[in-house]
Amino acid sequence: MRHADCSLVYRLVLRRPAADRQTEARILSLCPDGAAAHYVGALQHERIGNVDGAIGEYRQALQQERSFPLASGNLGLLYAQKGMDDEASVELARGLSSSPNPKYHRAMGRILAERKVYPLALYHYGEAVRGLPRDAGLRAEVAEIHIATGQPEKAIEEYRRALAVDPGSEKAHIGIAAIYLERNEPDKALEELKKAVLANPQNREAHLMLAGIYERQGDTRLAEYEYLLGGRAKSAPAQKPAGEAPAPANGDQTIESLKAVLKEYPDSAETYEKLGNLYRAAGKESEAIDAYREAAHLNSSNSDLYMNLGLLYEKRSLLDEAAVAYRRAIQAKPANADARLRLADIYLARGSQPQAVEQYGEFLRLKPDSPDIQLKLARIFAQNKETNLAIEGYLAVLKHSPDNADTNREIAVLYKTKGMDENAVEHFKKVLTSQKDDMETRNALVSIYVKNKRYDEITALLKEAAELFPDDPNNHYKLGLIYDFRREYDSAIASYNKAVVLKPDHARSLNALGRLYMKTGRLAEAKEVLEAAKKADPSMEETSVLLSNIRDEFNPEPRKISKGKKGKSKKGKKGTKPAKASKKPKSGKAEKKTATKKQQQ
């Protein structure tokens, strides 16, 4: 294939980097040796986990097209994955030069954070968050930078944002717990660590932190249990009564000793529970389930046993069995908030919303300082169109996190639905304070301002959008419309022209520009841009009408004939034509006067 054609394929890839498999196959067939083909080959290697093969293909693509930002950025990601930070930073910078991919920003931020260049790291993370606002892990990474720079309050704020996106983010819970421990607030740390363990019962870090707290509080039994779950022997042996044999040091030996006890006391629910705990800590989940079930059959009254059994069932996606276990945990201990939360999540996943709402409500009664659950409950109410209850829930969340963008956006939508425009505007503005690039929120604000004829606010909002996204022709077009409406014609023309410069075939801007030129008497310019608009979008009816009106202005003769007093002249004999021609100069002057009057109007 000719090089020029390969260049076209390359430009196609730049415009549409996320091609489907069919398009990729076409690229490979059209230009099998070009940079675009090597880029596609690299993507295919990545899909099957062949990192080295992908790196080789990206390098070949860059040998042919040195300025290939997608190949550079993706290569930088792979270098970072392999720990080649120097090479990664070079390629990521090249990728970011023309492709603001949030993944590139995140990788660059991580490299800079490791090198302790924190201000630049925060900049790149900020750009990544703009592109990936629902990524809880990204928020947690930002929080870690704030911790490294001695700003724990900002770190907690970021962790809370992570939890608003993903209430089960164990990384966020553990991060907050660590800050509370630094402040010597073990009770608050304990609550966060329990949530982390609920999110992932296998998280050893959380278990070890819990063990340390229990040990400092003097609860050696719970400390030992958590140390076992964390995969470590307890830090110090508990004092034994005189004459009592020491506990076996090895977990398997402990399991065998408990089995020996059960041979002698087969009806001991407590022993089965301990055995289940040890199996669970050792990762032997099937054996743990069997042991817990035996304890349950013996009517154990320990709520924690049923809680652990439910967690194991849930991990295996046995939701019916898990729900039964959580209900028994609640029956044994009605104040078991964690069991209520897990049961509520199961009900919600199965579509049993009334039961989910009941359990979430009970959880919040036990733990009212839980904005993440309050947010979940508010969203259920909003989904069920219980607007007042939803608003009440969102307001409870905002008391704890007043700047949370998602919460402000969602409550604003509800206020807008209820016609409470001032409340909606207040919360939409809070969203834009932290997320200026949220176009959905901007459009919602514009619609409220239009409804209430607040044209100064509309102008300011659209002007800011055009400044934030100067390369988007639609933003300049919308700004031109409001200037046009306010009869600020010079500003409107300038905005429409900016849109056309960015996108020469932007039909709506060309049409609006032509209409405005007609309005201001610039007919020749109007004709030119309207013809361009018609070419860009032949289906636009208004363009055809405006062009027809311009032709009437430029060709006055038909108008003169149609308005003549003697309609018979149209059907007259050939001999009458010289007389009509002799009057032409006079009628031409009259028509010029008419056109001048229209321009003045």
Image: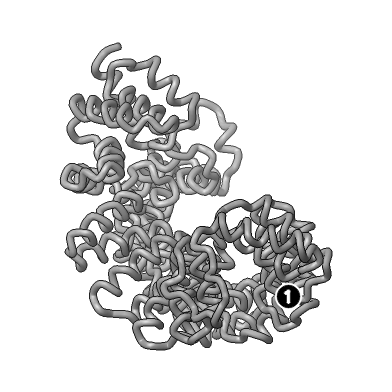
Q: Looking at this view, is 425 or 58 the one in front?
A: 58
Task: Note whether residue 351 is visible.
Answer: no
Q: Determine whether 106 is above or below 446 in the image.
A: above
User: Of all residues shown, which one is farthest toward the top?
Assistant: 1
Can you identify the residue that label 1 sits on?
A: 302
User: Of all residues shown, which one is farthest toward the front?
Assistant: 243
User: In the image, what residue occupies the spot 40% across and 45% down?
Assistant: 530
Q: How many marks do you count on the picture?
A: 1
Q: Looking at this view, is 431 or 73 the one in front?
A: 73
Residue 553 locus on image (x, y percent): 42, 48
Q: How is the image coloured?
A: one colour
Secondary structure of the residue carrying tag 1 is loop
User: In the image, what residue occupies the spot 38% across and 38% down?
Assistant: 582
Q: Where does the C terminus fall, quadrant-wise?
A: bottom left
Residue 572 locus on image (x, y percent): 57, 32
Residue 442 locus on image (x, y percent): 46, 68
The amino acid on which the numbered mark 1 sits, given as a three-letter code, is Asn
